[in-house]
Each structure stands twice: as C-alpha cells, then as structure tokens.
Amino acid sequence: MLANDESNATYLGFDLSTQQLKAIAINGSLQVIHESCVHFDTDLPEFRTHGGVNQNADQQTVTAPTVMWIKAFDLILERLKINGIDYNMIVAISGSAQQHGSVYWKKGAINTLKNLKADNFLHNQLSQCFSCRDSPVWMDSSTTKQCRELEQWVGGAQQLADITGSRAYERFTGSQIARIYQTKPEMYGQTERICLVSNFCASLFAGDYAPIDYSDGSGMNLLDITTHDWSQQCLDYCAPDLRTKLGETLIPTPSVIGNISQYFVDRYGFNVDCKIVSFTGDNPASLIGMGLRKDDVAVSLGTSDTVFLRLTNPIPALDGHVLCNPLDDNSYMALICFKNGSRTRERIRNDCSEGDWSLFNELLESTPRGNFGNIGFYFDFKEIYPVISGDFRYNKFDSEVQRFSKEVEVRACIEGQFIRLRVHAENLGYNIGPNTRVLATGGASANPAMIQALSDVFNAPVVLKEQPNSAALGAAYLAKYSLIKNEMTFEEMIEETISGLVAANPSLDAYNVYTPLAQRYRKQENEIAKKANHTLNV
Ligand code: XUL
C-alpha cells in the first residue's frame, strides 16, 4: 500500500556534499523522522579521500571517485533501514548535491543502469560504467585557460554573465568539460552521457538518465538563464556533440522525473509508485531548506561569508552568480560568496581584543554606527572579488591611512564585511525594501553585537536560522512540494514549519548612516579592484 494517507506519507531528501552523504526523511507535516549519514573519509576509507576529495600535487585538480558516491548510497540505504525507516511509505525522493561537479557515463552504461539486479549492490554493478573514473568537483581550479577562452568566445566576461548568469569560473562545468575534451579526447569520445552530481544521483534512483534541472544547470556557464535552454554558443566552445551528451531537455527543479527503479522496489521494499523528483544543487536546495521568502536575504557567516537571495530582475555582474530560482521558473536566485569571513574576524579579534569576543563586542559597541566615516577592507586570503589580499583603510575624506585605533578597526572590519554583502546583493539587482528580512546562519550569527551591526547595515530585522542540514532538508521539502505545487505555493506549504527568532531590529538612523556609506564603499572597492587590475562595470 502506498501512503496516500497524508499521516503516513514520508518524503526522503539526500544531500551529497563534499565530505558526506546525508539523508533526511520527513513526514507530511514536514517534521524530520529519520536521519542518516555516511562520511566518505571514515566510512569508505578504501577510496583514500581527504575531506571527500583527492587533490593532485599542484592542488589545482580536485576530484572524487564516482564509485565512492555510489557506494555511499548502498551504505546509507542499509543504515536508514537499520534506523527503522519504512521504505514502503516513501511517496517521493529528491536530493541535493554539490554544485558544478560532473560525472561521465561510458558508452553502453545505460543498459546496466536500466537492468540492475536486486541481489547485488549498486557499486558492484556500476563500477565499470564511467569513462572518467574520478569526477571533477567544485574545488577544482585547473581550468583557467578554458575560462578565458570561453569568455573570449562569447565576446567577454560580461557577455558570458549576461547569457549564463556568471562570468567563467574554474569550477563551473562548461570549462571542466572543455578541459577533458582538450586533454583527453578519447575519454570524451567514449562518454555517452555527462551528468551533474545532482542528476547523476537522480539517475541512480530512476534507473535511467535523469535530466538536468534549471537551477543546478545554471552553475555550468552553459545554460541560457533567460530561455532556460542550452546556449548553443557556449556548448560550441566546450566540445562537440555536447547537447546530446548533456541531454536535450532541461527541466524545472520541482519536477517529477518518473517512478523509482524496480531495483529499489525489489531490494529495499520501496513502493512501485514512489516518485523520483528532480535532484538539484546544494545552493538552490539550501534556499528551499531555509524557507527563503521573496524579500528575504539569507546570510551565512562562516569560514566564507555567503548570501542567497531571490531576484525578479537580475543584473548579471562579474562578482556573483545568478542562478534560476528552484521554486519559480520566472525568477532567479543570486549566490554571492566571499572567502574572507570568520578567519578574518578572528584575526582582528586577536589583534585588537586579545582574542576575547566579549572585549571585541565592547569595542564594537563603543563606536558609533558609520564609524566616524572610516571604512576598512580586510583580505587575509586572496578574495574572489576584488582578487587581492591585504588590508585597506580609508578615512572619512576617502584618503588611504595605515592604521586605525583598535575600536575603529573592529567596527571597520565588521561594517566593511557586512556592507560588501549589501553592496554586492544590490549590484545583482536586489533592492532593500520594507519587507526585507535578513536570515542569518553560521557561527558569527550567535554574536549579538555583530547581528545588530548586520541589521543596521541592511536596515532590516535579522532573523536567526540555525539549520545545519538546510540542503538535505530542502531536498525533502522539494520532494513534497513537487507533488503538490499545483495546489499550493511553497510559502503556504512551509508556513507553520519554518520560523525563526527576530534577534535584532535596525536602529532609527540606520538608513541615513549606511546608504551613503555603501556608496563610498562601492567606490573604494572599485579603486582596490583597479590595483588588482580589474573592475566591475557598475
Ligand atoms: C557554489 C560552490 C559551493 C558548492 C559546495 O558555487 O561552489 O558552494 O556548491 O558544495
């Protein structure tokens, strides 16, 4: 019996991330009822990965063994069963996977995929099905040559961003495929299908090649984000016959691909009517898992500082990514990522407040909003934008200075980091409005003084969202939403489930202080970018 009865219906979401495979099962009320996990390094040591990946000596080529991911599915399905999951009650399965990575199926692999034998593990049956044994992943940075060639091919970096939502990035799949074609043409020739990690996982469950979804597809530098079709111009640069190898059809993210493969019915007792829903990238899945509403901005303050937001009229730029919105084909999401997050905050804390966060907060609170007009840029690691490292400090006359007092330094670091999130969100077309809420996650979101500064910089309330498994949860929500999307909106579906605590409200003068400061920040950032030899055209 399939669980048509809502009270028993179960939805399963996977997240195949860099270091682990996670599974979350939810009931019809979106409550988590089962969780399980496989860590690649420790649970599958025979693949000898470090942090889930293998790096070559020059550290630029970063891959993961494709079969390791398959074996992780064999293992997690056993673990979920031991945890007591009833596979017969699963109505739909979806998933999330690290964006940009790619999988290369060998000619003839489809026959094996369609005829899996229930008495054997997946990894034993599929181990010989890949023309490229190791999948390039998002940490790979070996494709600089292909990136510059692709940009040139379409007329420049901004032109590529206008078509695909992003300038060329080393980790994006188009340049990865181009490198394989250029350096190993025979391997490319032996490939019948190229998948992203997301639709590779969906293919395992569907027992057939699953299409790429719009949202994950927009992290490839190959998809035209306006038409939702492949950009023939971009495909032509990368490799011949690529449209066929990627699959002609792209699908909206909340789509049912088909029923589960007979293999899972026979081996694990899944119901024959269980639906396989499109899998997507981890960033779109996190947007779903955090329950991002139309006007919300999600800010994750961790090792890197990242912003997600939804956009109706995006302005693709050279400093962030515009992806198709996983919940709405007519709108977009932006993803902006900066490398210098918590490690830089910790450095300033060590320099200015003897490594003590409470003293750091006292210093922060002892200076006024706007920091007497002083602005600071702190880049411990070479930043994604501007591509530079070092510290840059400006006084209220926009003159560069060598140092600030300790309390000014602390505020300059925090305000500078938060203003850049706002400025770059605005560069991509986001407008702060009366309904804006900032959803904050990550380590620094626990610091009340920082959260107050975040609220002031965005002139919006900050809501705390501690959701460590937002991608896997987002996948489970996606499984359910895809089945009911004609009956209700996503917002209606999650209404009562996703709440959060308002942790800070903006001060009365926040708008007047930070609107001009953000303008000055933008100008000075462009000056710094000139030093690094590139500027944004904003
Ligand atoms: C985003 C990116 C990473 C991966 C992590 O563009 O490369 O966030 O998605 O899995």
Image (cartoon, grey):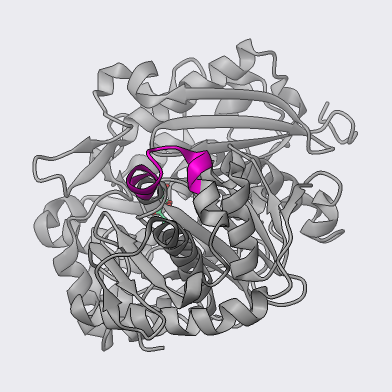
Q: Is residue 353 magenta?
A: yes
Using the rendered view, name the quadrant where residue 19 is placed: top left
Location of residue 326 with respect to 265 vertically, above or below: below
Residue 422 visible? The answer is: yes
Location of residue 85 with respect to 398 vertically, above or below: above
Residue depicted at x 63% and y 74%: 331
Residue 208 visible? The answer is: no
Q: Position of residue 493 (x, y in %)?
A: 83, 52
Using the rendered view, name the quadrant where residue 146 is placed: bottom left
Using the rendered view, name the quadrant where residue 252 is placed: bottom right
Segment tinted magenta in the rendering: 346-360
Q: Position of residue 420 (x, y in %)?
A: 45, 69
Q: Position of residue 426 (x, y in %)?
A: 54, 78
Most common secondary structure along the magenta stretch: helix
Front residue of 471/446: it is 446
Quarter that holds the C terminus: bottom left
Front residue of 446/257: it is 446
**Image-based side of 11 in relation to 97, left or right:** right
Residue depicted at x 53% and y 62%: 367
Residue depicted at x 44% and y 66%: 416
Front residue of 23/429: it is 429
Q: Is residue 394 magenta?
A: no
Front residue of 285/262: it is 285
Q: Position of residue 51 (x, y in %)?
A: 32, 31
Quarter that holds the N terminus: top right
